Amino acid sequence: MDLLRTEFDIQHHLVLSRKDTLHHALIRMIVSTLSTPEELANLRKKDLRFNKGKNLDYYTVKLSEGGRSRISPVDKRTFEIIQTMPSQPFRMSEEEMNEIVRSYSPPGRIYTCKKLREAVESILSDSDLFGVKLKNDEERYAFMLDFNPLYSGLWDLEDEEGVEDFILSYSEVTGSRDWRKISDETGIEAEIVKKVIESGKKSILRFRADF
């Protein structure tokens, strides 16, 4: 699968789920930590930690599955969202989790927890995640800060260029140029969507298809 399209699919889940805290937090945990459904179901708020490192402050979460546990980096915003939720945020079955992820899939594609996790893995493996020897939790967090766009805020639409790219790609994938509809579906301010749609610019996905 084209990595640009894969990135859009992941961001589509993140942006459209923002209206529902539980759904958004579930999707963020998968994208941020590559969590499995069992790890999510076992998660407790007490499993999250803020750490002061040698070179940077960082966030981690202890994830458990099948009697085994691992420590994963988690991005700051996801950490903060989980702190506002009940002590066991994701008390649901794997099928219920899959239904949440599925409901935010882009047109023509169906994602589950597993497929969303694999999509994130494909982005990270392109950055040579599996070929880099990371010695400790701080280094793992620093790596994710560099190569997982959720950690840097890019997938959270924190800069003007990122917002524009997402709107153009959303319009390209959905086939809609109705700025009011796009604003309603994505939660992006209507005037911003209108300005981007009326600019006549092409989506990066369209440029890729043209070549």
Image: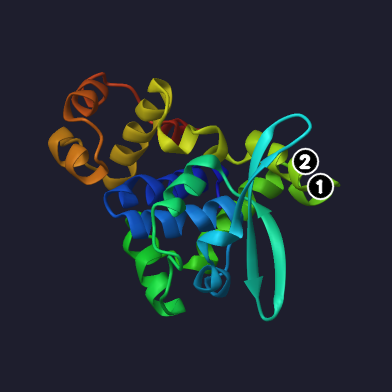
Residue 192 spot, x, y in % from top left: 23, 24
Compare residues 112 and 168 and report the one nearer the observer: 112
Residue 115 lies left or right of residue 108; in this view the side is right
Compare residues 22 and 175 and report the one nearer the observer: 22
> How many numbered circles are shown?
2
Q: Amino acid at mark 2?
A: Glu
Numbered badge on residue 139? 2
Numbered badge on residue 177? none
Label 2–label 1 contact, CB within 8 A: yes
Q: In this rendering, does residue 78 appear at all?
A: yes
Q: Secondary structure at mark 1?
A: loop
Numbered badge on residue 136? 1
Bin the neighbour count of mark 1 within 10 Å (Cα to Cα): few under 14, some 14-19, many 20 and up: few
Q: Secondary structure at mark 2?
A: helix
- Render colour scheme: rainbow
Q: CA distance from mark 2 to mark 1?
A: 5 Å
Residue 172 spot, x, y in % from top left: 32, 39
Q: Amino acid at mark 1?
A: Asn
Q: In this rendering, does residue 105 appear at all?
A: no
